[in-house]
Amino acid sequence: MATITTPRLSLSPFEPSDWAFFRRLREAPEIMRYMAAIASEKETRRLFAARLTAQHTFVIRRHDDATPLGDIGLQISAQFPQEADIGYTVIPAAQGQGIASEALRAVCEYAFIRAGVTAVNTYVLADNGGSVRVLEKAGFVRTQVLEKAYEINGVRYDDWVYRLAGSAA
């Protein structure tokens, strides 16, 4: 599995030792408020096990520090292998420092050059202004608004669909 490096970051595959970080991330209300309801430990372990074997998922760290700052990953479509969905999370202490932007650009470049993808898609809740800014700064274009299409803890949210074509990267 690949490791991606940027000027400040190392994006490496998940290791079993990343479990505590992954669990904290998936149990943090300030992170999960834009993603999903907080899952049971059993479900979080199942998701983590999938991350350990996934080909295009990465833990985000600074070069000079082994502390995980977030995660990012591609899900290449089985039906349309030239397309992938991307998702990412960054711990609150690392937000606002360009970490998500730098990791996003690097993984999109990886998708286009090394994974054979021609377009990357993502879904973001309209209320998640920080992530919207990260996506738009990276050149993603909003292609669709899915009104009240996503539910978290009984509340329905607008879901925005964004796309980055390989030639735009």
Image: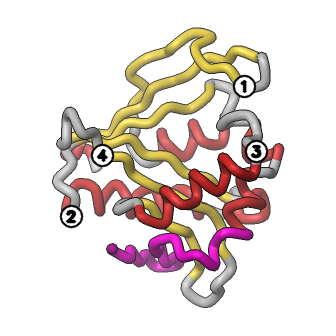
Location of mark 4 (residue): 76
The range drawn in magenta is 1-20
Measured as percent of width and height from the top left, residue 124 is found at 56, 32
The residue type indicated by label 3 comes to Ser
The mark closer to the camera, 1 or 2, is: 1
Q: Is residue 142 above or below residue 21?
A: above
Q: CA distance from mark 1 to mark 4?
A: 25 Å
**In the figure, is residue 134 to the left or right of 139?**
right
Q: CA distance from mark 3 to mark 1?
A: 15 Å
Q: CA distance from mark 1 to mark 2?
A: 34 Å
Location of mark 3 (residue): 40
Q: Is residue 29 above or below residue 89?
A: above
Q: Earlier in the sequence, mark 3 or mark 1?
A: 3
Residue drawn where x is 38% and y is 74% of the image: 4
Residue 113 figure quarter:
bottom left
Query: Does dot 2 land on a helix, a strand or a loop?
Result: loop
